Image (cartoon, coloured by chain):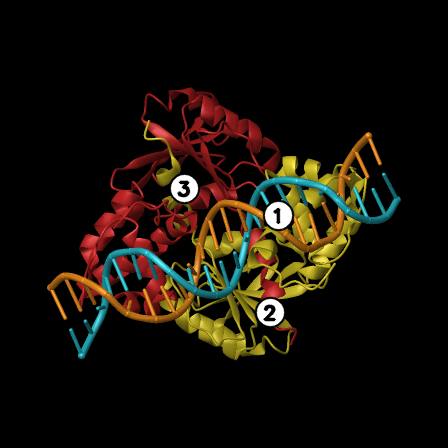
Chain colours: A yellow, B red, C cyan, D orange
DNA sequence: CTATGTGAATTTATTCACAGCA
DNA sequence: TGCTGTGAATAAATTCACATAG
């Protein structure tokens, strides 16, 4: 293995591989070939092998990959091998669901705090998290929280992002349907499910 | 403009452009340059121009693009200029939120039906939709519903997909964290927000 | 003078074919 | 023999530079 710049597309796929490996591991499978994994995930084998090869020789020729070992390697590459604490801002409909969602845990995420601006919500508990006033955001650094999850209405997204960055957030998961500006060192990933749905008809046969 | 195969990446970006244009339109802006739109969306100007150029000459040199006209063009390209009826299967936590979500309407989507397997839920109403028994799925074609939204637990995702395809679905939005197999003519888009969150730490400075 | 539209150059990503190791 | 790892070939996407139209 020689030095290669790692394609962003490879990074985008690693969580998918990890998801599959965790499933196979739960199912008791110990070893998997690139072909089997590809079939399981709807991917293609050379792609998988090349993606892994950027990081080292993870497999055994003639055999395949050890499921658990590979999962651990990917976790490490993605820096998911340490717990990341996150704070959610905006406990409305969507925010409540994200807060209650259990699917983050397996990737090492712990939503450790929730904030809202509505005094009627403050003090209430959802999924064992007490909702705090947004003015408490400044306590994030002290609490070792470095990820922000934005589930406020669109108009408030930019200011929320800025508050999170000021409070020390290094990464932001933005559920508001808009672009937000942050300092370069902060990584933002925006999720807008309507955007995904919106390209479905293009690919659908016109009947 | 000559013939070009249209990149998938362009299709992926069109909804983002549309989102921005709709916002600008609401704000009363009539005209926009590729530079302004790029600034607003966090994109880059030549990219935007090239993307549009695949479909025709939408702009005016020296001036820019007419916001409303361009929005209408993109809608047409994405086939969002007709109403698409969708059926949601699995009215749990996530399903209820998706059902109540108003953000799809602006792109011409109408969640016209909801199904669940739990008899306690059947007959209840959410967002003016009465939850039906999944056995009613076979009525989809008659009701001109051609999009399925899967919000069932992972174990039930594949069978739900098959039921939807049998009922005539041409496109599926899958919220279950797994790959689902369908006939080639059916387009599936899978959304797994944990996948997006999972690549955030990789890009975050190690502090 | 401004901002689009686009061929050409460049960069990035995928696929292929097969050498190499268990 | 089987499946990985990878350089080379191919394909796809982005960026650039600038001719062109308003």
Rendered image quadrant of residue A11: bottom right
The percent coordinates of residue D14 (x first, y second) are 43, 61
Query: Tag 2 or tag 3, which sits nearer the N-term?
Result: 3
Out of B51 and B81, give the one closest to the viewer.
B51
Category of crowding for the residue at label 3, using alpha-carbon neighbours closer than 10 angstroms: few (below 14), some (14–19), many (at least 20) = many
Instruction: Residue under label 3, please give it.
Output: B99
Tell me if I can see residue B28 in this picture: no
Which numbered dot is residue A16? 1
Tell me if I can see residue B15 in this picture: yes
**Position of B144 compared to B163: left or right?**
left
Secondary structure beneath dot 2 equals loop
Residue contact between numbered discs 3 and 1, judged by CB atoms under 8 Å: no
Which numbered dot is residue B204? 2
Is circle 3 on the same chain as circle 2? yes
Label 3, label 1: how many angstroms apart (C-alpha)? 26 Å
Nearer to us: label 3 or label 1:
1
Label 1, label 2: how many angstroms apart (C-alpha)? 19 Å
Quadrant containing the C terminus of chain A in the rendered view = top left
Category of crowding for the residue at label 1, using alpha-carbon neighbours closer than 10 angstroms: few (below 14), some (14–19), many (at least 20) = many
**Position of A16 compared to B160: left or right?**
right
- Chain where mark 3 sits: B
Category of crowding for the residue at label 2, using alpha-carbon neighbours closer than 10 angstroms: few (below 14), some (14–19), many (at least 20) = some
Residue occupying image coordinates x 70% and y 52% = A52
Rendered image quadrant of residue A24: top right
User: With respect to residue B183, does A98 lie above or below?
Assistant: below
Secondary structure beneath dot 3 equals helix
Residue occupying image coordinates x 64% and y 60% = A110
The percent coordinates of residue B86 (x first, y second) are 37, 34
Residue occupying image coordinates x 55% and y 40% = B176
Nearer to us: label 3 or label 2:
2
- Chain where mark 2 sits: B
């Amino acid at each position: 293995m020689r030095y290669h710049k790692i394609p962003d597309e490879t990074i985008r796929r690693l969580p998918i591989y990890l998801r599959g490996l965790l499933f196979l591991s739960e199912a008791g499978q110990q070893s998997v070939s690139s072909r089997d994994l590809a079939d399981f995930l709807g991917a293609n084998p050379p792609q998988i092998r090349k993606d892994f090869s950027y990081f080292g020789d993870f497999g055994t020729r003639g055999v395949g990959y050890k499921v658990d070992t590979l999962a651990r390697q990917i976790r490490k590459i993605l820096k998911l091998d340490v717990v990341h604490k996150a704070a959610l801002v905006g406990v409305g409909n969507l925010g409540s669901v994200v807060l209650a969602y259990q699917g983050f845990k397996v990737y090492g995420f712990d939503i450790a705090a929730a904030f809202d601006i509505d005094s009627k919500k403050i003090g209430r508990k959802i999924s064992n998290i007490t909702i705090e006033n947004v003015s408490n955001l400044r306590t994030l650094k002290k609490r070792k929280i470095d990820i922000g999850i934005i589930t406020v209405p669109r108009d408030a997204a930019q200011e929320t992002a800025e508050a999170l960055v000021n409070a020390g957030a290094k990464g932001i998961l933005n559920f508001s349907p808009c672009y937000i500006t942050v300092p370069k060192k902060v990584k933002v990933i925006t999720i807008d499910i309507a955007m995904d749905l919106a390209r479905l008809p293009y690919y659908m046969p016109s009947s």
